Amino acid sequence: MPALTRRAIRVCTALTELRGRGGDVLDALTPFFEPIFELSNGKIFDPRAFALGVQKLYKWRFTTDIAEQFIPRLVRAGFLERIVSSGPDAAYLVRYQARDDIGTVALSEVLSEIVDEFQRFSPRLTNLLTYNRSRDELSEILINFLVSLDAYAPAEFAAQLKTLKPSRDEQDTLDQLEEGGKPLPQDDRYMAARFVQTLCAERPEYIADLSRLASVGLLTEVVEDFVKPVQIGGNTDLVVILDAPLALDYLGCSGTQLKADVSCILDSLRQIGCNIVALPVTCDEMQRNLKAMLANKPPDRHGYTHNAIIRREVMIDYVQAVANNTEQALTKSGVTVLPYTLQHFPGQHNFFSSELFEDFLSTIVWVQEIPPREHDATCLALAMRLRQGRHSSDLFRCKYVFVTRNARFVRDARSYCIENMLLNENHEGPVIHQRELATITWLRTGLGASELVPKSHLLAYCDRVLNLKKEVRDTVGQKIKAVTPDKYEQFELLLLDQKSIRRLADLTLNDETVITDENAEQLLEAMRSATVEEEKAAFDKRLREERSNWKGELKKAREQKERAEGVAGGVIRERDKALEKLEEVRKAKIARIGEIVTQTNRIVGRFDGVTTACIFIAAIALILNSIFHWYPPVGTLSAIVGTAMILLGGYHQLMKVLERPTIGVPTIMGWLAKLLVRRKLVQAGLAGEVNVADIQIDQGRVSIPQSALGESIRTAVQFSRE
């Protein structure tokens, strides 16, 4: 494992152990100093040589004074041994012994897994360039990126190294140290940023570990100012003044990730009592920047806001609304706009006079246009006037501070104030970098009780690194216009698509120097196909989702069908049972009606037989009376009547046997049968089930046709007399 990687892991582990215990967090940085102590082991500790070694290794702003203030920490860590203890003449001997990496195994294993992912990721990002790095090189690149050791350019410290003029022995020691702190090359930085962004999106389980490593980078930002309080503090009355880019980030005009980063810092500051404000001159700067961007044709636009619009993270109508009224937008978001200009409060002008304003304005060289130069000079002047001479080494006691992302502005403003004796070396400058504010906020609010600040800072940094450089866009455009001018319009349209822009940045690793006449058209084709591939991938994903949803719906429909069939089956079974019961009732009623018909026919038949028998008996008696004169007065009449009755009875019986209608008797039998049927139906409770008027009676025989039955028991069955 590379030395830097090993040291970073140890620092990160130390930070984790300190969390929540209130320890001095800068003690955790001591593993970074081991290469110096290893070379100077057994020698007298020289703060100046130590500071030179740190500067050469890491390019930290590490002075001799800071090295002297670090001595108690180094003694506690066991790197120094006091050999002379007489006040200012105290001397220390370097005692270095290699430390075991006990306690760092877990993070080392995780980092090894992350580097494995990095090794698999790098070849598939670009096929235009040959990007070959060994595993150790990838590990070093990733750690370098995460701990932000390239935050400051090496040239920035060259002059300071020369002024220190190391002695021959010091120079010999320095020569043995590797030259560190070099900024990562553009391709390595882009590759690392792209990998971190992809890893956070696809493997969120690694976010916490990446954030812990990023916290080391934040901590190195305050090494030079370690004498400032970094312990958890109470509420403060600090007023933070936002620069235009940070205000736009906070409003969401620069995209989701940058808004999250600034919001995380400002929300943490509000929790400890800070107020967030902006100046009218900054509102004018914001308005000027947005309107300048919107005034350009879409293909000519660039910057964070334009990229956020392309990514659809912010609507262009919202950007237009902010540009029209920046003060209202800031006020609605909770940022107060101070009505304060250079002409206000003449009594405060002695803290930064108009002459100093003009003088500092003349020193601004990081921007050419007059309005931005006047903006920066005005913000410095107003911040100093608002402080009214109340300076401190503790940022949270300075009352006012202007925060920006312009590192040159931060450095020059501080240097100018010190040179003009407006503050001393130990005071916090009136202008502070967002990175340093994030670090101090993180430390002040509890040493990463939440790791949101390192995480948001890391992701926002990745977002800024991955932002397509204007130089890359312009170079490709120039090559396309020169080689295939008819395709330049197509190139301009592709610049409005985020997928095409991302593909261009990936293939070139955001480095304009790799673009040539030969590969320009290849880049254009890759940009065009990126949109197609992305759309195809999105379509395939939607298709898979729809298929999955369709399968789920089909399965659900089948389950519903099975449940419905089960319910229907139950209903059918219940229905069949009910029908069976109804059929049983119907059959019972029909059977009962049949019994009634049978009984009635039987009674009527018996009555008919008895009546016929009586007629025969009476006729025989009358005939015998006429013969034997048992009753003389009716002898002749008896013979006549008896003969008539016998003939009638015989006729009736003969017609009955022949099943032919008889004359006279059927009327009596029909009336009797109908009377009996009606009475028995009423007694059986079936009067409503049979229409008596439709009952058919033929020769005293009762039959009930289907039309005479009620609807519930209607059937084609007819009942006849047995």
Image (cartoon, helix red, strand yellow):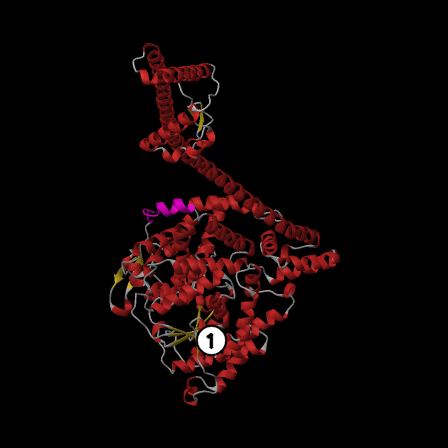
Quadrant (top left, top right, bottom left, bottom right) of the C terminus: top left
Q: Position of residue 231 (x, y in %)?
A: 30, 65
Name which residue lies at 43% across and 44% down: 113
Q: Residue furthest bottom?
A: 346
Q: Position of residue 388 (x, y in %)?
A: 38, 83
Q: Position of residue 230 (x, y in %)?
A: 33, 66
Label 1 residue SS: helix
Circle count: 1
**Local crowd at mark 1 within 10 Å, few (<14), some, or many (≥20)?**
many
What segment is highlighted magenta in the picture? 98-111
Q: Position of residue 458 (x, y in %)?
A: 45, 58
Q: Nearer the viewer, residue 410 or 424?
A: 410
Q: Residue furthest left?
A: 86
Q: Nearer the viewer, residue 464 or 572?
A: 572
With 255 as the anchor, is 526 left or right in this view? right
Name which residue lies at 72% across and 59% down: 481
Per the image, the residue denoted by label 1 is 413
With 228 as the anchor, is 369 left or right in this view? right
Q: Nearer the viewer, residue 419 or 467?
A: 467
- Is residue 443 visible to us here? yes
With 473 as the anchor, is 575 left or right in this view? left
Residue 105 forms part of the magenta stretch = yes
Name which quarter of the figure residue 638 lies in.
Answer: top left
Residue 106 forms part of the magenta stretch = yes
Q: Residue furthest front?
A: 633
Name which quarter of the figure residue 12 lies in.
Answer: bottom left
| 624, above or below 701, in the image | above
- Is residue 165 visible to us here? no
| 472, above or below 604, in the image | below
- The amino acid sitting under disc 1 is Ala
Q: Nearer the viewer, residue 436 or 134?
A: 436
